[in-house]
Amino acid sequence: MDQIAFISLSVLALASALGVVLSKNAVNGAMCLLLCLAGIAGLFVQLHAYFLAFILVWVYAGAVVALFLFIVMLLDMQGGRPWRFRAAQAFAGFMAAALLLVGLDLLAVRGRLGAGPNVGQAAVGSSLKLYAYQLFTTYLLPVQVMGFLLLIAMLGVIVISRRIGGAEDSR
Amino acid sequence: MKPSLDAYVLLSAALFAIGFLGVLVRRNTLVIYMCLELMLVAATLALVAFSRFNGTEDGDVFVFFILTVAAAEVAVGLAIIVALFRARQTVEVDRLDSMKH
């Protein structure tokens, strides 16, 4: 049962990831990204990381993909030439991706990754309490830094969009 | 029967490779950005799998941070893309080559 769920979810994720790369229309690409994220969230659930699956759907599918769709429609790039790539570039791209895939595949086939010592244990990622305990003890400084980073990113976005816009239609 | 750790790592490698292919092949800056996000998510899948199979939660916490950074990165990156589009009227990487020469 687990195996069937894993295979179907991974096929969904891989197919929609290919859809992101191959789709001519950027809106279709964003939709494929959404599907891919749904598949990966399902895999997270299968790995007992329920909280992360929730966060993934919330942040990625809810915010990031919506932002992508918004920008795609704002810039209105439907009429572009999406697939005009030179032979050399395409060759280099396929070669690099294939080499990466083959190398990692060899690594996974030759070097068996044994399961860790505590496989049979109860799922750690499923408990929100353990999660919060980690975040507010061991990782307290990173949490603070993240908050600062989000603040800086917000300010940066405001500055970037204001300055260019102000320069364009200077009153 | 449960899927093994190898299967998860392999899947994450395949997703990463697909995203990498997209970054190298596509010409539209926004699609390149989506493929970058795909690579990030593939890395998080490997982290969650390792974390689960080792019985620790450190990987899960890292994924939390990765998601936060990715959200901030998307906001800033898309603002830059919009600013670029306003200045140059294009988002094709072939035409954004003023730093090349």
Image (cartoon, coloured by chain):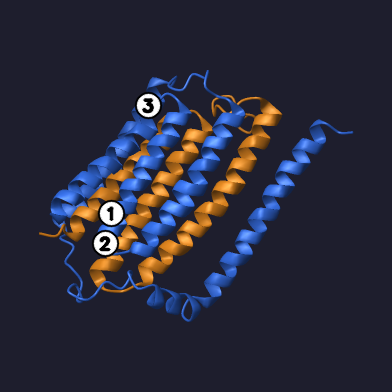
> The disc numbered 2 marks a residue on which chain?
A
Instruction: Report how far apart the C-alphas of labels 2 and 3 lie in the structure.
Output: 36 Å
> The disc numbered 1 marks a residue on which chain?
A
**Nearer-the-camera pick, A41 or B24:** A41
Residue A143 in the image: state x and y as whole percent.
54, 71
Dot 1 corresponds to which residue? Answer: A43
Residue B70, placed above or below residue A19 = below
Quadrant of residue A44 in the image? bottom left
Dot 3 corresponds to which residue? Answer: A90
Identify the residue shown where x is 16% and y is 66%: A114
Q: Colour of chain B?
A: orange
Residues at marks 2 and 3 on the same chain: yes
Quarter of the image with the C terminus of chain A in it: top right
Dot 2 corresponds to which residue? Answer: A47
Residue type highlighted by circle 2:
Leu
Judge whether residue B18 can be spotted in this image: yes
As drawn, is A24 to the left or to the right of B54? right
